[in-house]
Image (tube, rainbow, N blue to C red):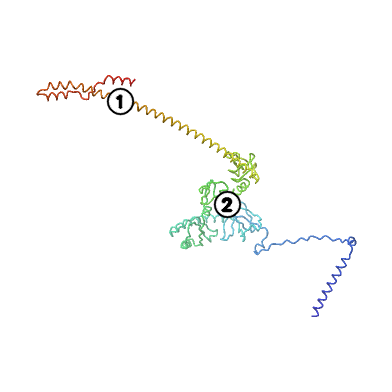
Amino acid sequence: MSGYKNHRRSFGKLERFDKVIEKEKNTVTEPELQTVKVEEAPEKEVEAPEKKPIYFDKEYENMPDFSEVIGVSFRGSGKMYYFASSGNVAKDGDYAIVETARGVEYGRVVMTNKNVAKNELVLPLKNVLRIATAEDNARFEENKKKENEAFEICQKKIVAHALDMKLIDVEYTFDNTKLLFYFTSDDRVDFRDLVKDLASVFKTRIELRQIGIRDEAKMMGGLGVCGREFCCHSFLPDFVQVSIKMAKEQNLALNSAKISGACGRLMCCLRYEYDTYQEESRRTPKVDSRVITPDGPGKVTEARPLLGLVKVALDETPTEQKIYDRELLRPETEDEYKDALEKKALREKKEAERAEAKAAAAARVAEAKEAALARATADKNDKNKERAQKNAQRHAQRQAALHDRKNADQSSEQDAQTPQIAKNESAQDGDGNRQNHKNRHSRPHHRRPKPHADAQKGQNNKSE
C-alpha cells in the first residue's frame, strides 16, 4: 500500500514540474525567441532494408535466382521442356538422355545451355543425364522398330476383344520399362482384359491413355488447308484457346468447313492474327456509327480494319457511299449529332412536302384521264345509238322490200298455174292418171320465178 502511495506522489511531482516548465516557456518574450536560434542537424535518410518475400516452398527458396538449363523436345513436337544441365554442354542438333516423371527419355536439344530465372521454371527441375552417344542413338532406332511391332499386335488384340477404340500411337520409354498406347474413343472403354493380354506378350509395364481428337492430329501430323504441315505437329507448343468470336473479328465466313482444321475443331491459326485485328478494330470506327468526314457527317456502312478504309453514307446523299481513310475521320459530338438530327428532320419534311405535291399532281392527272375517258365513252355510246337506229331503219326497209317481193312472186305463180290447170282438165282421158304422173315428174323442182320488174329495179337502186 505504501508503495502505491509513493507511486502516486511521484506522478504528482512530475505533473507539477511540467506545469512550471510550461509557465516559464510562456513568460519568454518574442525578441528573446528571435535571438535564440538552434541549428538542427539534417536528419540522415536511413534506407529501409529490402524485405525478401517469404516462400513456403523451401526447394524454390533455396534455388539460385538463375539456373543453367537445356531445352529438350520429344517426339518432334514443338513443346520445349527445361532440364538442369548438370555440367553437360549441348550443341545444336544434339540429342540428350534426360530424366522425366515417367522414366528415362531420349530427346532432341532445341536450346543449348542458357541461364533462366527461377520464376520461369517448373519445379521439380529434372536433370540431363548425358548427351546421347552412338549407342543411345542405335537403341532409340531399335525401340522405334519395337513400337511398330507393338502397334500391329495391339491392333489384333483390339479386334479380338471387340473394343470400340482407335489406336493412334505406341511409345516405348528409352529404358524399355514402360510401353504406352494412345487411343481415341467416343465412349469410355473397359480395356482391363486387353492390358492383361498385352502385359503377357511384352513382359513390361503397360499403360493405355485415351486422348482427344486434337491430340490425335498432333501425334499423327498431316497437311492443312494452307498446304503446310500442321502447326500443332511442327512448332506449336500448346493448344491455344480459339473461339468463334475470333473468326467474326476477322470478317471470316462462319462456315465450319472453312474455319475448321483436320481435327474438326476451329483452326489454331485463327489466334495468330487476332490481336492485330483487335488493335486495328479499336482504331477503326464501327459499322452503324456516326462520323464526321471532309464532306460532312455520315454513317459508317462498312469497315476494313487492316486497310484502314471506311465506307460512309453521307447525310446529304444517303444513296451514294464514299470510301475514306480512317485518319480523315473523327467521331461525331453530341452537338453535331443534334444538328444532324435537325437537318435530317428538315430534309425529311421537304421530301414529304415534295412527295405530297407529286401525289396531288398525279391525282389531278388521273382525274383528268378519267374525265376524258368518260367523255369518250359517252360520245361512243351516242354514236352507237345513232348507228343502231340507222341499222334498224335499214333492216325495216329491207324487210318491207322482201315482203313486197314475196307477194309479187306468189301472184305470178298463181297466174302461171291457171292456164296449165285448164289444159290438164281438157286433155284428161282413160290414161289420165298416167299422164298426170308423167307431167308431175317432168315439172322442174324449186324453180324460182323471175322477180317482178319493180322489185328488180328497187334492188338495183339499193346496191348502187
Q: Which quadrant holds the N terminus?
A: bottom right
Question: Mark 2 belongs to which amino acid?
Answer: Leu
Residue 346: image quadrant is top right
Query: In this figure, which residue is indicated by the disc labeled 2?
Result: 236
Residue closer to the observer: 229 or 43: 43
Disc 1/disc 2 C-alpha distance (Å) = 116 Å
Residue at horizontal 11 percent and vertical 24 percent from the top: 432
- Which label is found at residue 400? 1
CB within 8 Å, label 1 to label 2: no
Residue closer to the observer: 237 or 419: 419
Residue at horizontal 30 percent and vertical 25 percent from the top: 400
- Give the side of residue 47 with respect to residue 168, left or right: right
Image spot of residue 33 (x, y percent): 88, 62
Q: Is 80 rendered above or below residue 61?
A: above
Question: Which of the two discs, 1 and 2, labels the residue nearer the N terminus?
Answer: 2
Residue at horizontal 47 percent and vertical 33 percent from the top: 371
Image spot of residue 396 (x, y percent): 32, 27
